Image (cartoon, rainbow, N blue to C red):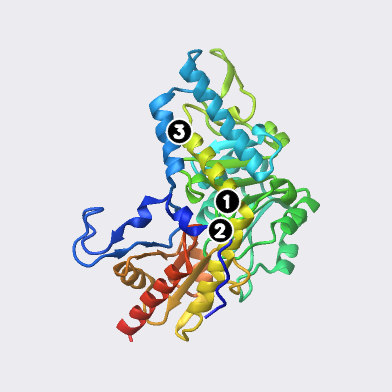
Amino acid sequence: MSTQQPYPIDVEAIRADFPVLDRNVGGDMSTPGEGEGDTEPLVYLDNGATSQTPEPVVDSIVDYYYNYNANVHRGIHQLSQEASVAYEEAHDSVADFIGADGREEIVFVKNTTEAMNLVAYAWGLSELGEGDSVVATQMEHHASLVTWQQICKRTGAELRFIEIDDDGYLDMEHAAELIDDSTEMVSLLHVSNTLGTINPVEEITEMAHEVDAYSFVDGAQAVPTRPVDVGDIDADFYAFSGHKMLGPTGIGVLYGKEHILESMQPYLYGGDMIRKVTYEESTWEDLPWKFEAGTPSIAQAVALDAAIDYLEDIGMANVKAHEDLLAEYAHEQLSEYDDVTIYGPPGDDRGGLVSFNVDSVHAHDLSSILNDHAVAVRAGDHCTQPLHDTLGAAATARASFYIYNTREEIDHLVDAVDSARELFA
């Protein structure tokens, strides 16, 4: 057992803001909230997919719908004015949170995937062609890999992949070989959603800029869990999703350097993104509205703002410290078993997740047994099928941690894994 360091945050106070953590689960799952048979307290370890939402964030959504529900930028009446101010202030909060220069660099989208597609279509289709290359990594999420794969097929550009080593780190010598004068875009994860690898995004961005290429960083697993400053990284584009950082589903963020977004054509057309329309021509609204066509996700933006407030009250350095503590502890405990394979870097050098397999137990079967013990984990390829092929694993089980998780919950996970080992022995 590791030394029991004190938690860097008040976990019990935080847990009180999440009513779902008081649930008992198990038994008959056909009726949510009404399980039959033996149940146990929920151990929610699927935060890499979606985090839970605290009461103050839910309250912000209720407040919007109860008190100033109206469309933005469309009306002179008071409710529209109030909604517009709240929506625009949410852009400001995100900009401050990630170190952007202002709201002009913050585009609200549905999720990280849409952010990737926005750049790929609005920039990639017009800028890529025969003789160009896009460099990604072997650990890419499908949101990046499939998107650039399809854009390269349409434009004739070449898609290249930086290899990983046996410990799940990027091969930086291989990166230096692939990022050359033909490269127009380097797209990579900040933190791998499968391996937990924390990639050297500043160094790779610098490599891209040395050959006049852009960099796109997928920060879906990074922004919720650690301090991120896009200015320090110097990435040209950076994206993340609200639902992984205590916010609601249906809203994500694309950060882009202002001069690059100015040069790009819109990805979607319609209302609110236009300045003047005639039967012959249209002109576009200023940033970021140029890329936010139609009625946006107003309530979700208000709630994302509230989620940022919640995280800032804790302090992102403290969030990271808590994640580091739990990831190292989980890695240490699972490493005690000879028949458990853990993927990715060592426990003291990874993001807040651990993907693993138990010999002779398929990840889906393992997840089912863990669910019988009220432990929620992700099982499958985690939208990284090519990476799993590289690892020689059809699927893995992934436990991912957040601010409300505890060592005791990890102990419960390990006990449940032990039960699966005994069942399939």
Counting residues from the N terminus, which is met first, the one under dot 3 or under dot 2? Answer: 2
Which dot, 3 or 1, sits closer to the camera? Answer: 1
Along the horizontal axis of the image, is 31 left or right of 112? left
At mark 3, the secondary structure is helix
Residue 99 in which image quadrant? top right
**Residue drawn at point x = 53 percent, y = 13 percent:** 279
**Residue drawn at point x = 36 percent, y = 53 percent:** 20
* Residue 176 place in picture, x, y as percent: 75, 63
CB under 8 Å between callouts 1 and 2? yes
Q: CA distance from mark 1 to mark 2?
A: 7 Å
Three-letter residue code for mark 3: Ala
Q: Is residue 25 above or below residue 212?
A: below
Q: Is residue 65 above or below residue 387?
A: above
Residue hosting label 2: 9
* Residue 197 place in picture, x, y as percent: 60, 65
CB under 8 Å between callouts 3 and 2? no
Q: Residues within 10 Å of mark 3 (few under 14, many from 20)?
A: many
* Residue 297 place in picture, x, y as percent: 47, 33
Residue closest to the far left: 36
Numbered circle sitting on residue 362: none
Residue 104 in which image quadrant? top right
**Residue drawn at point x = 50 percent, y = 72 percent:** 330
Numbered circle sitting on residue 299: 3
Along the horizontal axis of the image, is 303 left or right of 127? left
Counting residues from the N terminus, which is met first, the one under dot 3 or under dot 1? Answer: 3
* Residue 69 place in picture, x, y as percent: 42, 25
At mark 1, the secondary structure is helix
Three-letter residue code for mark 2: Ile
- The residue nearer to you, when weighing 304 against 290, is 304
